[in-house]
Image: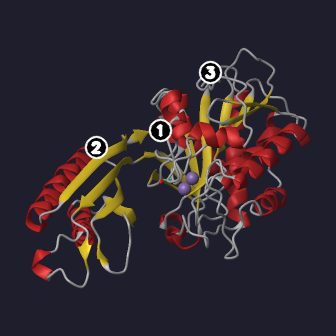
Amino acid sequence: MGTARHNLRVDGARLWSTLMETAAFGGTPAGGINRLTLSLEDGQVRDWFRNACEAAGLTVGTDELGTQFALRPGRDMSRRPIATGSHLDTQPTGGRFDGILGTLAGLEMVRTLNDAGIETEAPILLVNWTNEEGSRYAPATMASAAHVGTFTVADILARADADGTTVAEALARLGIVATEPTGSRAIGAFVELHIEQGPILEAEQKTIGVVEGGQGIIWFDGTVTGFESHAGTTPMPRRRDALTGLAEVALAVERIAHAHGPSAVATMGEAVIGAPSRNVIPGRVRFTLDVRDPHAATLDAIDTDLRAALAEIAARRNLAITLDAVWRQEPVPFDPRLVALVERGAESLGLPHRRMVSGASHDACNLALRVPTAMIFVPCKDGISHNESESATQADCTAGADLLLQTVLTLASSPAAP
Ligand code: GLV
Ligand code: MN
Ligand code: MN
């Protein structure tokens, strides 16, 4: 039996066909996916996922934030399950692999175990976390954060999107009914497969990234306030233009990230004029910042520098500029024993690999605060992600799913909890 398990491989073609089939939910003409969390399209893929899990013999529960938990029983149901999964929501210009690969590879893993008639000691849990992306609702990874107790359920349910629709309302519109409280689902360990979303693996011709942890993140909401006035009659020296102030803010953000390089990155992803009109000088602009670095001290230093730069711009231009940190995720290391297990698994499958830190945020970063956690990365084309052209090869997706299968199988077959 041991040899048979060691030789077990997923069906790469079957995994690929589920990736392509579900890409139709929110599929865009450019070949990407627009499937914002808790949208109608997200509802469609959730229904597909539930049906596929049930057809594979899993029992599916839903928590108060809509996260789906699909359980495959083990011989010893007193053991906490070995969990895997990721997310099925996407960015508005998202691709076919970010999150989706890890979720559907978990399904493929279960199907492979079923086909081989393998029963594990510990149960296996497949998870589709709600709102990993953080595009419609901030913060990213909100449901896994609530699962581990970083936020209360009431806080998250009250968060509103740009149209004022709360998480609670969006869940109700999709008819999502909780069958269990958030945080109640037992998890013994968590292993997540994901595309790298960056260029390193491809450049070094490695198939597997053995992820040692995730970098830290701060999300800011900001405003620049000046004074709306007539575009034709207000002399240049008398203007208090919020948009030109914002332009200086954007450049300061870029300069500060460079100054804390090479690892620091900073992005103004949203910049919205309050009441745009061709012949009105912009009086209000709101913006968002996403700042990341593997070191907490660097995040602190960037925070300090940003505030100083914005104060200087505001004073010089006679504007009011606000900056609120709405989310901070500390850099998080993954479990060294699980990281080593992933590494040994890549070795025994003969897959070229390297250790790395995740530049993107993942639900695994929240789980790592509570349970032994690791991640497996596979390359994506040109390192591009959060783009409709995001692409990964069937061979790499299959290799990642094989390593996920072997890692989960080892953990779930071991006589003791990890
Ligand atoms: C999640 O996609 C992130 O922003 O890293
Ligand atoms: Mn993702
Ligand atoms: Mn993403």
Q: Which residue is drawn at 24% across and 70% down?
A: 251
Q: In this view, does 370 lie to the left or right of 392?
A: left
- The residue positioned farthest toward the bottom in the image shown: 232
Kindly identify the amino acid type of the residue bearing the numbered disc 3: Ser
Q: In the image shown, does 12 or 146 lie closer to the viewer?
A: 146
User: In this figure, which residue is indicated by the disc labeled 3?
Assistant: 184
What is the quadrant of residue 4 in the picture?
top right
How packed mark 3 is, by other alpha carbons closer than 10 Å (few <14, some 14-19, many 20 or more), is few
Q: Which amino acid does label 2 sit on?
A: Ala
**Where is the N terminus found, in terms of image quarters?**
top right
What percent of the width, then of the height, locates residue 15? 79, 56
Q: Which mark is residue 296?
A: 2
List x then y, in percent, for residue 334: 47, 38
Residue 321 percent location from the top left of the image: 21, 56
User: Which residue corresponds to mark 1?
Assistant: 334
- Secondary structure under tag 3 reads loop
Mark 1 residue type: Phe
The figure's colour scheme reads: secondary structure
Q: Is residue 390 above or below residue 230?
A: above
SS for dot 1: loop
> Camera-side residue: 342 or 290?
290
Q: Residue at x 54, y 65 (%)?
A: 385
Where residue 348 sits: x, y (%)? 66, 48
Could you tell me how far apart the alpha carbons at marks 3 and 1 are, in whole angstroms?
22 Å
What residue is shown at x 44% (from left), y 46% (from top)?
214
* Location of residue 387 with respect to 399 vertically, above or below: below
Between discs 2 and 3, the one toward the N terminus: 3
Distance between mark 1 and mark 2 Cα atoms = 16 Å
